[in-house]
């Protein structure tokens, strides 16, 4: 496979991505970013419809991707109740940007995998079947026995293992494969969001899950596309409709490999940010920065209706797919 830098990909790979106006602008901007002309060109074009709607270079609407955005409902506190999930590792070719396919390793066919949700003190039971071509595990963040940690019980292709432990502590967590080489197993797509609800229920809200991820489609150890929940630019092409009358709550986790940090920035409003989903650690801001494995909960009470952008506040990540829109309606 030809080895070339991300910068070079930006310049040369435009034909790889079906040539939507945004793609052209993104690539052109990278190529000419030192010139005033390049900026003018980008601003002129980006100011129009190309950033949102049918021309955005993302995939068609996908039921599997849409399912990742909405978590299963929270259940009331009932200690000892069994919460069961089944995760099957599968090697799947995913379309991670329009016309760009990536040979992913997945839990249940998507990267990220399904949202796992429990209430504190539920007995969580996750049956893992390895239908992929490599040894895998599931490592959960949280409190559990060493034998349930996804480090020692390497599950070979064709094998299975059942993880079982009481769900705690409440908060926003994540899970991922912990087979070696770890960097590869995470980057290939084996990760997901893990929500543990507090005994005292959170206030009702419009709940969303966003797992920040990226894909190195040319295998040079640098990411070429960035997103939340999978395909680049998905929520720019398919904005997330929310109501102004109720809090929007986002469960956010960073599973981006290779890059040290990722971030979430909201336009036109502020949010409360709960680090690790814990009420003790809250700030009021419009931008949060997360290292890999960091996660938290955002609560937005939109003041206005209309389309509001959200994106990584690393401009390059945004231009390579990690951006989208809320459509706030009454
Ligand atoms: Cu693995
Ligand atoms: Cu981890």
Image (cartoon, rainbow, N blue to C red):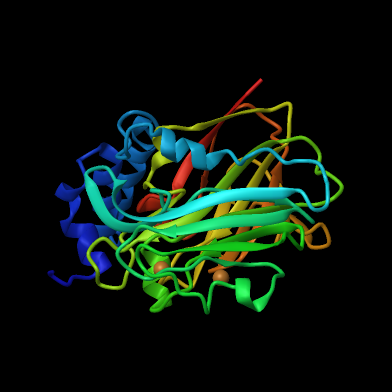
Q: Residue furthest top?
A: 330
**What residue lies at 60% left-to-right and 53% top-to-bottom?**
252
Q: Position of residue 64 (x, y in %)?
A: 42, 38
Q: Is residue 5 above or below residue 57?
A: below
Q: Position of residue 53 (x, y in %)?
A: 38, 29
Instruction: State which image quarter holds ligand 1.
Output: bottom left
Figure quadrant of residue 189: bottom left
**What residue lies at 30% left-to-right and 31% top-to-bottom?**
55
Q: Position of residue 204 (x, y in %)?
A: 77, 35
Q: Which one is in front, 50 or 148?
A: 148
Q: Is residue 235 above or below residue 96?
A: above
219 relative to 186 in the view: left or right: left
Q: Residue furthest left?
A: 2
Q: Is residue 264 above or below residue 208?
A: below
Q: Quadrant of the N terminus?
A: bottom left
**What residue lies at 21% left-to-right and 61% top-to-bottom?**
9
Q: Quadrant of the C terminus?
A: top right
Q: Which one is in front, 16 or 268?
A: 16
């Amino acid at each position: 496979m030809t080895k070339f830098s991300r910068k070079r990909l930006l310049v040369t790979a435009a034909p790889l991505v079906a040539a939507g106006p945004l793609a052209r602008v993104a690539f052109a901007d990278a190529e000419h970013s030192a010139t005033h002309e390049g900026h003018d060109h980008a601003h002129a074009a980006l100011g129009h419809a190309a950033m949102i709607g049918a021309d955005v270079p993302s995939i068609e609407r996908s039921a599997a991707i849409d399912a990742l955005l909405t978590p299963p409902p929270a259940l009331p506190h009932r200690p000892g109740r069994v919460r069961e999930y089944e995760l099957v590792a599968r090697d799947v070719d995913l379309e991670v940007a329009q016309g760009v396919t990536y040979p992913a390793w997945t839990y249940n066919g998507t990267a990220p995998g399904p949202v796992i949700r429990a209430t504190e003190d539920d007995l969580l039971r996750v049956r893992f079947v390895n239908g992929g071509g490599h040894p895998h595990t599931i490592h959960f963040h949280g409190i559990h026995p060493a034998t349930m940690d996804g480090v020692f019980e390497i599950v070979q292709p064709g094998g299975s293992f059942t993880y079982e432990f009481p769900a705690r502590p409440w908060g926003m967590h994540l899970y991922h494969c912990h087979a070696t080489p770890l960097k590869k197993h995470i980057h290939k797509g084996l990760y997901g969001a893990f929500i543990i609800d507090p005994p005292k229920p959170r206030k009702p809200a419009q709940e969303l899950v966003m797992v920040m991820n990226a894909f190195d489609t040319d295998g040079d150890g640098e990411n070429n596309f960035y997103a939340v929940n999978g395909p680049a630019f998905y929520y720019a092409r398919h904005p997330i409709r929310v109501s102004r009358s109720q809090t929007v709550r986002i469960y956010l986790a960073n599973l981006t490999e290779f890059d040290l940090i990722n971030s979430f920035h909201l336009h036109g409003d502020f949010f409360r940010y709960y680090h690790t989903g814990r009420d003790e650690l809250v700030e009021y801001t419009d931008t949060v920065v997360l290292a890999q494995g960091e996660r938290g909960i955002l609560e937005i009470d939109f003041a206005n209706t209309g389309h509001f952008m959200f994106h990584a506040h690393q401009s390059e990540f945004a231009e390579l797919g990690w951006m989208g829109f809320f459509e706030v309606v009454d």
